[in-house]
Image: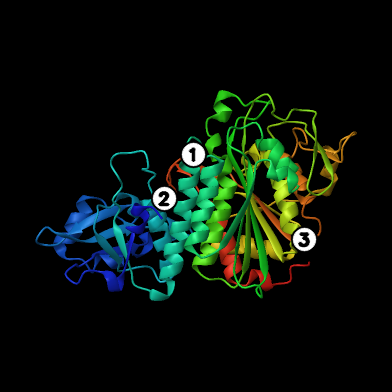
Amino acid sequence: MSDATSQSFIRRQDLPSAVVPVILDIIGSSHWDRYAKSLTEAQRVFVGERRFTAEAGQRLRLPEANGRVKRVLFGIGEEDTGAEMRLGSLGASLPRGYYRFGHVPAEFDLRLAAIAWGMGAYKFDRYLSEKSEPPSLVLDDAASETEIISSVAATTLCRDLINTPASDMGPAALEQAAQDLAKTFGAEVSSVVGEDLLTQNFPMIHAVGRAAHEAPRLVEIEWGDRSHPRLAIIGKGITFDTGGVNMKSASGARLMKKDMGGAAHALALSHMIMANDLPIRLHCLLAIAENAVSANAYRPGDILQTRLGITVEIDNTDAEGRLVMGDALTKAAEDTPDFIIDFATLTGAARVALGPHLPPMFCNRSAPVETVVRHGMAQQDPVWNMPLWQPYNAMLSSPIATLKNAGGGFAGSVTAALFLERFVKKTPWMHFDTYGWNPTARPAHPKGGDMYGVRAVYAWLKAGGLNARLSE
């Protein structure tokens, strides 16, 4: 966790005895008149002069008679289901100091509000001389402390990995991030690198990454009690995507440092599972490569062998993520997990369909879908179910190979998911086509690398998702 994120919270028992935190009063507009009656006459004049009426996002530092600020008023408007996430604007804007919740609406989720506070306090300052010093929120509920802190730490990890440029986040650095996470929680970690990918039968990962100056690799983390349900989490780790021989335009390449966002999401979810000691046998696999161009780059028209034993004709070298994921998914399925979840910054088509903030979810079982979507809404981390429309498999047909790696201009996120589905066979599986980036700052979500769907999935797992009927 970055220093700034660790400073965003303080446990109540760690608060210095001489410190009196500033009170945060969270007020809905419909309750403002009643709340205002609790203020002194001077305070009512003060808030009136500043036209504070508890509309969504309004913030006011309220002084006492001596001029010192001991209370902050924050408006959430009509108290809709997204109210808690608005607290992220306080974590981002209040001056350094200690704060604690005071008045809150009856239905307000303080755990979720605290997570939003920490998410909003995030700033990527690795390359800045002036480091962030966020305000600190006092955590009063010991039962939820670990989950709050781990949720924010996982979000920070994901964002930091995505925001770091490819010059400092190549395949070796991304592997090191996995090594560091494994060490933190006493997990086992292993990797297959470079030419060993061929001898150990990961030919598609090797093909995609062989042109780069840093070798491609498959990194695996193992953690948990062997008696618990086995969950495989796979992440796409393309540390930079030139598009290969089918090279991207300048604008298309500009954000391709984020093409390892799936691996960042996989590590973030693994962090939350291990930090909260969920009863899960975790297997995290990262398919890592840089899709570069050189004399030995793979080409359109090439036929690639796969770990599964089928062949793939390369229709477009810019559809590389599904290739590395295919080998990783095959490896995960070989170990007979109870469930497979993957995250990948896979298609622009997903952004066209649902925009940057709402990742499409594909699942080869109907039973988990409604529950995961419901948990996403409750956590204000929404996901949207999309169909594995089997007739579109025809778009992936090839006359000279088992299938091709791109399906043309129609239903791009669906055909990409159908490609991945080939490699899990009958294993229960869920796929998230995430953008991994927030193009415009909003409460709890600064502009830049961002995490989508992970808190939704974690909530589902915590609620016993792996113990549900996954065969349907």
How packed mark 1 is, by other alpha carbons closer than 10 Å (few <14, some 14-19, many 20 or more), is: some
> Badges 2 and 1: C-beta atoms under 8 Å apart?
no
* Type of amino acid under label 3: Thr
Q: Quadrant of residue 112?
A: bottom left
What amino acid is found at the position of numbered circle 2 in the picture?
Pro
Would residue 159 appear left or right of 336 to someone viewing this image? left
Quadrant assignment, res 6: bottom left
State the residue position of label 3. Answer: 427
| Viewer can see residue 376 | no
Q: Is residue 88 above or below residue 391?
A: below
How far, Cα to Cα, is label 2 from label 1? 13 Å
Compare marks 2 and 3 and give the one earlier in the sequence: 3
Q: Quadrant of the C terminus?
A: bottom right
Is residue 216 shown above or below 33?
Answer: above
Reading the image, the residue beneath label 1 is 439
**Residue found at x 75% / y 58%:** 333
Residue displayed at 52% across by 54% down: 179
User: What's the amino acid at mark 1?
Assistant: Pro
Q: Could you classify mark 2 by the number of other residues whose Cα lies within 10 Å: few (under 14), some (14-19), or many (20 or more)? A: many
